[in-house]
Amino acid sequence: MTEHSEPYPVISQRANGDKLIGIAGPLAQDLYDAGTPPVHGLAAKPHRSPRVGDVRIGDRLRVERIGDRWTVSNGQEQLGVLRWGPKDDGKRHAVTGKVIRLPRSGTLHVQRLVIDQRGTVKDVGGYVEPDR
């Protein structure tokens, strides 16, 4: 894993010292309304690839639904699995009441990173633009 040194603002800091950096972006409800669901990170299991450490803000990663999981890859290997679940697809948004639709495939636009105290990337966030 490489250290992250790009100058993005700190959005929040966690008790363990990890920082969420990047572009705060629109509200989740606005992303759902636009048909571009938000990504708030990768699931803890199955384990994330060490290559997550190479992801940068502005990267575009491939998202594919395989069975009950949405995988994220960099074109060479799978980096991890989104926190989305099959029960989320078709569920009503708690604030707007609109139906949430999760795409079968698309592009994850990376807008945020979780970095540790050394600057190593631990997780990613952004939104998914569905394939048309």
Image (spheres, rainbow, N blue to C red):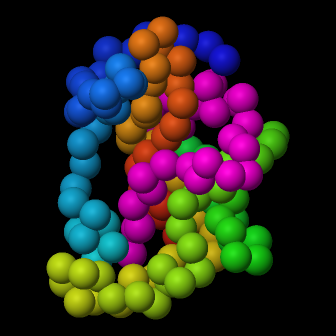
Horizontal side, residue 85 vs residue 13: left or right: right
In this view, the residue in front, 8 or 69, is 69
The image quadrant that residue 131 belongs to is bottom right
The image quadrant that residue 63 belongs to is bottom right
Residue 107 position, x and y percent, is 56, 57
Residue name at image x 62 percent, y 13 percent: 2
Screen quadrant of the C terminus:
bottom right
**Residue farthest toward the front in the current orientation of the protein:** 15
Horizontal side, residue 15 vs residue 18: left or right: left
In the rendered image, the vertical position of residue 63 relative to residue 52, given as above or below: below
Residue name at image x 59 percent, y 80 percent: 86
Q: Indicate yes or no whether the magenta region holds residue 54.
A: yes
In this view, the residue in front, 18 or 58, is 18
Residue name at image x 45 percent, y 56 percent: 39
Horizontal side, residue 32 vs residue 30: left or right: right
In the rendered image, the vertical position of residue 118 relative to residue 39, given as above or below: above
In the rendered image, the vertical position of residue 128 relative to residue 69, given as above or below: above
Per the rendered image, the range of residues in magenta is 35-59
Number of numbered markers: 0
Q: Does residue 109 appear anywhere in the picture?
A: no
Residue 4 position, x and y percent, is 49, 15
Q: Indicate yes or no whether the magenta region holds residue 123.
A: no
Q: Does residue 95 appear anywhere in the picture?
A: yes
Per the picture, the main secondary structure of the magenta-coloured stretch is: loop
**Residue farthest toward the right in the current orientation of the protein:** 76
In the rendered image, the vertical position of residue 21 relative to residue 76, given as above or below: above
Screen quadrant of the N terminus:
top right
In this view, the residue in front, 109 or 67, is 67
Residue 106 position, x and y percent, is 59, 64
